[in-house]
Amino acid sequence: MKGSNRHLTLLDVGAGSGSMSVGFAQLIGPEGHVTAVDVNPDVIQRAKAIAEVQGVTNILFQTSDAYKLPFRGGSFDIVHCHQVLIHTENQWEILQEMLRVAKPGGVVAARESDFETQVIWPPLPGLLKYHDFSLKLVTASGGCESAGRQLLSWALRAGVTRGQITTIFSAWTYTEPEDRKVWGERPIFSICLSWIVAEYVCLCLAAGMIDMLRGSNNDAGITEADMDEMRDAWVEWVDRDNAVLAMLHGEIIIRK
Amino acid sequence: MKGSNRHLTLLDVGAGSGSMSVGFAQLIGPEGHVTAVDVNPDVIQRAKAIAEVQGVTNILFQTSDAYKLPFRGGSFDIVHCHQVLIHTENQWEILQEMLRVAKPGGVVAARESDFETQVIWPPLPGLLKYHDFSLKLVTASGGCESAGRQLLSWALRAGVTRGQITTIFSAWTYTEPEDRKVWGERPIFSICLSWIVAEYVCLCLAAGMIDMLRGSNNDAGITEADMDEMRDAWVEWVDRDNAVLAMLHGEIIIRK
């Protein structure tokens, strides 16, 4: 797509940390432009700071609701979301909005985890607890633990035909020794460290995550001892030669 | 590897239908050579016939036990198995045998399903039944429903170091319309058609599969009505625009 158009415009819905939005801006190049939106103004402030630190200027950050995008129809060549629909309800309404603001001939692209397929090995008790906890974290505020496999159904419900859609699954994994270390340093790992860290991390991650975490904590009755057990298990996991972490992700491209 | 050696030798352990072994022989080229073994002599006869039909001559088929390979140590550049360890016990003993017959500097490669991550959508009752049945099919004769995630552990238990191993996960999927049709015509799909077909298909698939199927049938109390329900559900699935089928596979390469 870039080959024939140096002035690509991309909308990133649910920008979260902003790392992906900034990556898109760098990829698209100085003649293209990225607009990154998130419903949480704090998240947008942090994402903006990341772009400034990296000297990326072809990007605009804006607080807005994915269900009511503040853009005219047919505004963007590419409309993208990543791990957004998994945390929402009536996901097809967001896809309809994304389709509305895409240009005719443009694409809507989404990638969502299928948390039910999360694989963690070895099966240390603290990791099994984390697996259950992470599923509850997704569902506690109305998210969907099997978003990856339902992405295609949501796209069809948004009103497009099967012929407009290309869909695949990809394998997300942190299994090689250097990847295990990266995972150990990721925010999601820090969720286990303490509730204070968790709240900070979730502020950085995506809107509503703190409420999800709190809701999950209340619903599941997860204690400080549980949190310690999960943290210790992840610390052990990082150093285990046979450690494995993987999950299926659903991916979809819709041609408008 | 082929770039520097036109005379590559490859051993395919658990050749099954032989389609992959024949593919390797074509890939390696006329100056290389493939040896394909399977414990079931009927399977070997069928695989041999496939090679003959395709005019592939740089391949030798041989009945043999994966736990006691009839080859000297250091005989092959590449020793490979695909969906074999998942159907066995003490999987590391097979990997030890594979390592023994690999040349120093050669590689042992394996790919195994992680059946617990099997994703089928939409969740028609007949497909949910099939999901449970297929897990039982794997475990009924001592196979492992989470082979994909345990592959790395088995390799370490076979005596190699983590530094010798590269491992990834891949996403196996039949979701695009043309892929759904291919899946509908695959032997595994036919398992649902009738026990007669199932037994024929399993003869073609791999040693011991019939016993697994029979064992699973007996253990699970699956009736002809269940089989009909699963068959009807798969027929419906092939024609559903929102149909999805995916699974994580574990992959490993060990450098000797």
Image (cartoon, coloured by chain):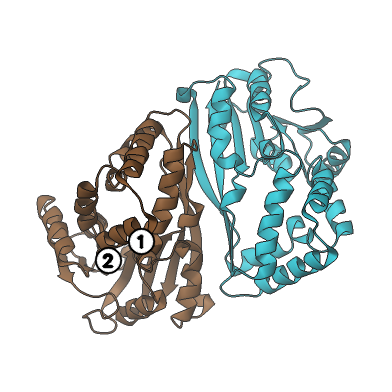
Chain colours: A brown, B cyan
Task: Please give the name of the residue rendered at 70% of the width and 34% of the height, measured from the top-left corner.
Answer: B30
Task: Please give the name of the residue rendered at 35% of the width and 70% of the height, measured from the top-left corner.
Answer: A88
Quadrant assignment, res B68: top right
Tag 2, which secondary structure? loop
Location of residue A133 with respect to A240 vertically, above or below: below
Amino acid residing under circle 1: Gln
Q: Is residue A92 visible?
A: yes
Q: Nearer the viewer, residue B57 or B130?
A: B130
Q: Position of residue B106 (x, y in %)?
A: 58, 23
Q: Position of residue A122 (x, y in %)?
A: 49, 35
Task: Please give the name of the residue rendered at 17% of the width and 58% of the height, measured from the top-left corner.
Answer: A47
Q: Is residue A58 visible?
A: no
**What number is the disc on residue A14?**
2
**Is disc 2 in contact with disc 1, using a CB cutoff of under 8 Å?**
yes
Q: Position of residue A151 (x, y in %)?
A: 46, 68
> Which one is earlier in the sequence, the residue at label 2 or at label 1?
2
Task: Please give the name of the residue rendered at 71% of the width and 46% of the height, measured from the top-left corner.
Answer: B138
Disc 2 sits on a residue from what chain? Answer: A
Q: Nearer the viewer, residue A79 or A67?
A: A67
Tag 1, which secondary structure? loop
Q: State whether discs 2 and 1 lie on one chain.
A: yes
Q: Position of residue A201 (x, y in %)?
A: 22, 51
Disc 1 sits on a residue from what chain? Answer: A
Image quadrant occupied by the N terminus of chain B: top right
Location of residue A60 with respect to A128 vertically, above or below: below
Q: Is residue B44 left or right of residue A23?
A: right
**What number is the disc on residue A83?**
1
